[in-house]
Image (spheres, rainbow, N blue to C red):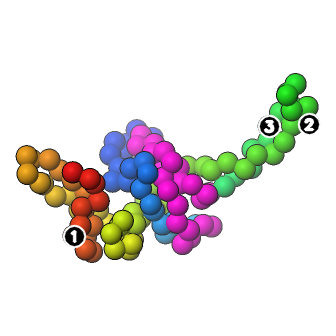
Amino acid sequence: MKGTWTYLDIRKGDMVVVLSGKDKGAKGKVIRTIPSEHKVLVEGVNMVSKNLRPTQKMPQGRIAKLEAPILASKVMLVCPSCHQPTRVAHRLIAGGKSVRSCRKCDEMIDKA
């Protein structure tokens, strides 16, 4: 699947809700998008443990909890105006610019 996706309707800073998996129903803010792998990194979702090696600053080492990327198809954008999970519509505004909008309340998601 690597390299087949080039565009995501979800962007950094968007609120999303998880649709499936161990974190189903969890809401969080998108920290980072990885369009080439069709994945997003969501705050507080898909937490994994990573073993950190001992260093001079931290002689014991430790186990850190980090967010792991999740497939973008497993999350849905939450509309900032109606607060409902929604698919994204693309609308043209004055000047020929394309913006994302909510399919439920028809409000613009992007600030024009």
Residues at marks 3 and 2, CA–CA distance in whole angstroms: 9 Å
Residue at 53 percent across and 54 percent down: it is 42
Q: Which residue is mark 2?
A: 60
Residues at marks 1 and 2, CA–CA distance in whole angstroms: 54 Å
Residue at 23 percent across and 67 percent down: it is 107
Q: Which residue is mark 1?
A: 106
Residue at 42 percent across and 48 percent down: it is 12
Of helix, strand and loop, which one carries label 3?
Answer: strand
Reading the chain from its start, which is encountered first: label 3 or label 2?
A: 3
Q: Which residue sits furthest right?
A: 60
The N terminus: image quadrant: top left
Mark 1–mark 2 contact, CB under 8 Å? no
Q: Position of residue 66 (x, y in %)?
A: 67, 48
Residue 34 painted magenta: yes
Task: Tell how many labels.
Answer: 3
Q: Which residue is mark 3?
A: 52
Q: Position of residue 57 (x, y in %)?
A: 85, 28
In the rendered image, which quarter is residue 104 located in? bottom left
**Disc 2 residue type?**
Gln
Give the residues drawn in magenta, as a range.
22-46
